[in-house]
Image (cartoon, rainbow, N blue to C red):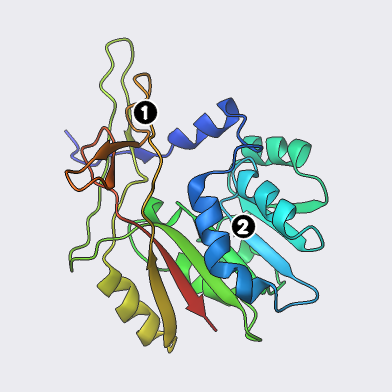
């Protein structure tokens, strides 16, 4: 009997069930608040969203920077088709950030990657590829997601236990340490980077039909924590990398 675990990523299909473009997520607002001064410096602003799904973040970017040149990229054609229907004046690319041969030749003043890096079991090659998409003329890479403030990297696979079918193991909740990112960036001769803490201030209820979706709870001091059905606490940060 083989001990090899077959890992898939099915959870992104949930985006096809959502209608959230006119209700931007709190972290969308947080990212733009941190990036706004940088983005306003360009007359012709080209931005890329890696792992754009159905285009919710692009829709928000367009509302904030209507004259910008937007591009969305994803590996799932079904998500891209939905994005094309709902986000106007935006280019969409079917590409894999881990495969340089699929990526555009264009360089962007701002490259965003939200909640995607935790899918991968290492930082290479996707981080190198993402950095190569950033313009060397004052461009920046913005990575939002979960990071570990302690010097521990966590690789996580989850499976929903259901009686009516055999569920497969899924990826998407790996948690790399800040230290791992720092070492990798410095090895790549990238010296200018900053981590910004994100603390959510609204309540998010638990989705009983989908325990992998995150929800909030209250600490004794009134702040909020975020957890999911894998019992993993989420420490969200924005990593801002300047080239």
For marks 2 and 1, the one nearer the N-term is 2
Name the residue tied to disc 1: 205
Disc 2, SS:
strand
Q: Residue at x 75, y 41 (%)?
A: 84
Q: Residue furthest front?
A: 221
Q: Residue at x 60, y 49 (%)?
A: 52
Mark nearest the camera among 2 and 1 is 1
Locate residue 150: give its quadrant. bottom left
Q: Is residue 68 visible?
A: yes
Locate residue 197: give its quadrant. bottom left
Q: CA distance from mark 2 to mark 1?
A: 27 Å
Name the residue tied to disc 2: 49
Q: Quadrant of the N terminus?
A: top left
Q: Residue at x 62, y 85 (%)?
A: 136
**Residue 62 in the figure: left or right of residue 217:** right
Residue 73 % position (x, y): 64, 53
User: How many labels were placed on the picture?
Assistant: 2
Residue 67 % position (x, y): 82, 62
Mark 1 packing: few (<14 Cα in 10 Å), some, or many (20+)? few
**Residue 95 in the figure: left or right of residue 5:** right
Of residue 161 and residue 216, the one placed in the foreground of this image is 216
Of residue 158 and residue 138, the one placed in the foreground of this image is 138
**Residue 221 in the figure: left or right of residue 123:** left
Residue 234 % position (x, y): 29, 49
Residue 57 % position (x, y): 61, 49
Disc 1, SS:
loop
Q: Residue furthest top?
A: 164
Q: Residue at x 24, y 36 (%)?
A: 230
Mark 2 packing: few (<14 Cα in 10 Å), some, or many (20+)? many
Q: Is the residue under label 1 in contact with that under label 2 (CB below 8 Å)?
A: no
Please, is residue 178 above or below residue 26 in the view? below
Of residue 174 and residue 95, the one placed in the foreground of this image is 174
């Amino acid at each position: 009997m083989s001990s090899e675990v077959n890992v898939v990523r099915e959870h992104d299909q949930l985006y096809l069930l959502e209608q959230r473009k006119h209700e931007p997520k709190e972290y969308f607002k947080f990212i733009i608040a941190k990036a706004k001064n940088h983005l306003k410096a360009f007359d012709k602003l080209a931005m890329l969203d890696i792992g754009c799904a159905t285009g919710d973040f692009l829709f928000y970017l367009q509302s904030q920077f209507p004259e910008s040149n937007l591009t969305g990229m994803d590996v799932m054609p079904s998500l891209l088709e939905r994005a094309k229907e709902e986000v106007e004046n935006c280019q969409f690319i079917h590409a894999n950030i881990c495969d340089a041969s699929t990526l555009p030749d264009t360089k962007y003043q701002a490259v965003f990657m939200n909640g995607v890096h935790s899918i991968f079991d290492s930082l290479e090659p996707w981080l190198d590829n993402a950095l190569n998409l950033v313009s060397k003329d004052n461009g920046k890479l913005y990575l939002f997601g979960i990071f570990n403030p302690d010097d521990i990297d966590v690789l996580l696979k989850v499976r929903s236990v259901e009686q009516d079918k055999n569920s497969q193991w899924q990826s998407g909740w790996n948690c790399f340490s800040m230290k791992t990112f720092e070492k990798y960036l410095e090895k790549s001769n990238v010296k200018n980077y900053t981590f910004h803490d994100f603390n959510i201030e609204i309540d998010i209820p638990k989705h009983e039909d989908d325990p992998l979706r995150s929800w909030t709870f209250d600490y004794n001091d009134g702040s909020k924590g975020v957890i999911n059905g894998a019992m993993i606490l989420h420490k969200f940060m924005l990593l801002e990398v300047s080239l």
